[in-house]
């Protein structure tokens, strides 16, 4: 499914340029020329992300951000301006902006920021099972302290949602919550993203860049997919946790910080330590308060609640129902992709049903593999991957962004289907060579 993007800028040429660029990348783009018109657009349809200029007539970007945070606190907002300072960056992040981009910016900067923003699972913590309620009880308890938290669980179980829940229930909730995907950036870029750099510290460093640890000062930083972090950076992170200070690239002096750290992983981190793939000392620094989120197949009581929520989210305001047979089918599936996979199924079933009543025939069109040991919807997933690659002309990074996955995850999926021998040969040769 295409992500719906709302672009707001009073500069006509900038609006059109952003629309053309984002449309070519596979997004569905709507435009507004000021904050008031943007509010009207948001009231008419559901958007996955908002990109807005700061200086605009009638209602500026900061005022629009405050309105969105009040009405839809989970909708990611990226602010763009030609008049940025470090203080401005901290201010808008504290107001709830996902990120802040200063003009002029490259297309890759914008695409990467959007990709990170769309990586957020914009849902609520919907649960009915004792297992998930126990997770939330633990989250509430650790929220009252500043100890480091390690959240573990399979992909799609809601690790970032639980991390945000910890932040929102802490004394730091009025300060920034800053997520960083450790798997989405190469080592050198991740280091500057985390710690920032001084002007002139290397070729191309034309201005001071504030790192995510510094932006999150007083708040919380989420190190998502921590096990993908390079060994050298692991050593630097260990020092941050030990000394409560960061070393800005190009600076002569360390900078003290007060940032709560939450890390997440979908891998067996202890096994990686035993295999020498993750630092043992860092593991113990991160694992002060571990939280494990069980997979959806072990908490099936949550499925009806999640289905109801996803129906409301993807029904486009219509009264979409689901038959008993279809619900029973969903209850029996193993959901290897957890809540994220379930949401994708409901979103597509809404379309196939014509936004009426989801029946078994609509689910059968997606060719569930109920008897598979993985329990995943392989035909549907494979088709979505192929469609995304076609739209993106074979560019795996852009296709992954469209699908809400990391590039690494997409490559692993492609390899999985190749190894299984279920990838259509024609499509494989054309898009996956």
Image: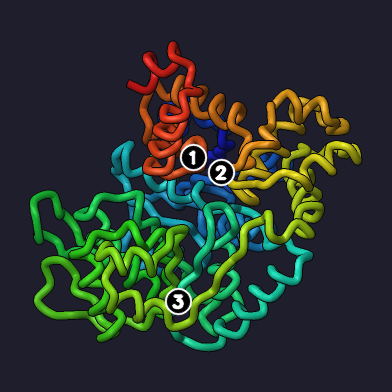
Residue 67 visible to the viewer: no
Q: Which residue is mark 3?
A: 219
Nearer the observer: mark 3 or 1; the answer is 3
Q: Residue at x 43, y 50 (%)?
A: 116
Helix, strand or loop at label 1? It is loop
Q: Is residue 149 above or below residue 395?
A: below
Marks 3 & 1, CB-CB < 8 Å contact: no
Q: Residues within 10 Å of mark 1 (few under 14, many from 20)?
A: some
The Cα atoms of the two marked residues, 2 and 1, are separated by 6 Å
Marks 2 & 1, CB-CB < 8 Å contact: yes
Q: Which residue is mark 1?
A: 10
Q: State which tag comes first along the sequence, 2 or 3.
A: 2
Q: Residue at x 81, y 52 (%)?
A: 304
Q: Position of residue 99 (x, y in %)?
A: 42, 56
Residue 30 visible to the viewer: yes
Q: Which residue is mark 2?
A: 34
Q: Residue at x 41, y 75 (%)?
A: 261
Q: Is residue 102 above or below residue 40?
A: below
The Cα atoms of the two marked residues, 2 and 3, are separated by 31 Å
């Amino acid at each position: 499914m295409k992500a719906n993007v709302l672009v707001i800028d009073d500069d006509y040429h900038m609006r059109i340029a952003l629309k053309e660029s984002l449309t070519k990348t596979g997004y569905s783009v709507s435009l507004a020329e000021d904050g008031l018109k943007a509010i009207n657009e948001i009231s008419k349809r559901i958007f996955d992300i908002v990109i807005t200029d700061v200086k605009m007539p009638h209602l500026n970007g900061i005022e629009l951000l405050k309105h969105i945070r009040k009405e839809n606190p989970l909708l990611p907002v990226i602010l763009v301006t030609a008049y940025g300072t470090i203080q401005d960056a901290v201010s808008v992040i504290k107001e709830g902006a996902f990120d802040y981009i200063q003009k002029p910016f490259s297309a890759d900067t914008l695409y990467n920021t959007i990709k990170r923003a769309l990586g957020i699972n914009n849902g609520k913590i919907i649960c009915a099972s004792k297992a998930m309620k126990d997770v939330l009880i633990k989250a509430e308890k650790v929220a009252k302290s500043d100890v480091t938290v390690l959240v573990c669980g399979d992909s799609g179980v809601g690790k970032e949602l639980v991390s945000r829940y910890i932040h929102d229930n802490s004394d730091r909730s009025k300060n920034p919550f800053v997520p960083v995907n450790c798997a989405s950036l190469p080592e050198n870029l991740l280091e500057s993203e985390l710690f920032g750099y001084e002007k002139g510290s290397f070729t191309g460093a034309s201005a001071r860049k504030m790192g995510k640890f510094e932006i999150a000062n007083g708040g919380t930083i989420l190190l998502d997919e921590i096990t993908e972090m390079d060994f050298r950076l692991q050593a630097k992170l260990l020092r941050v946790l030990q000394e409560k200070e960061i070393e800005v690239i190009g600076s002569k002096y360390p900078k003290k910080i007060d940032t709560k750290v939450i890390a997440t992983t979908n891998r067996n981190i202890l096994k990686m330590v035993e295999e020498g793939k993750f630092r043992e000392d860092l593991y113990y620094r991160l694992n002060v308060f571990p939280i494990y989120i069980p997979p959806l197949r072990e908490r099936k009581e949550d499925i009806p609640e999640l289905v109801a929520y996803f129906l409301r989210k993807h029904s486009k305001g219509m009264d979409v129902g689901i038959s008993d047979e279809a619900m029973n089918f969903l209850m029996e599936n193993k959901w290897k992709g957890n809540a994220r996979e379930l949401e994708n199924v409901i979103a597509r079933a809404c379309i196939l049903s014509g936004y009426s009543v989801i029946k078994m025939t609509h689910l059968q069109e997606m060719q569930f593999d109920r008897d598979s040991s993985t329990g995943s919807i392989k035909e549907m997933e494979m088709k979505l991957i192929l469609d995304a690659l076609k739209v993106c002309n074979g560019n795996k990074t852009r296709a992954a962004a469209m699908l809400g996955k990391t590039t690494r995850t997409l490559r692993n999926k492609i390899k999985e289907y190749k190894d299984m021998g279920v990838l259509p040969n024609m499509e494989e040769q054309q898009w996956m060579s």
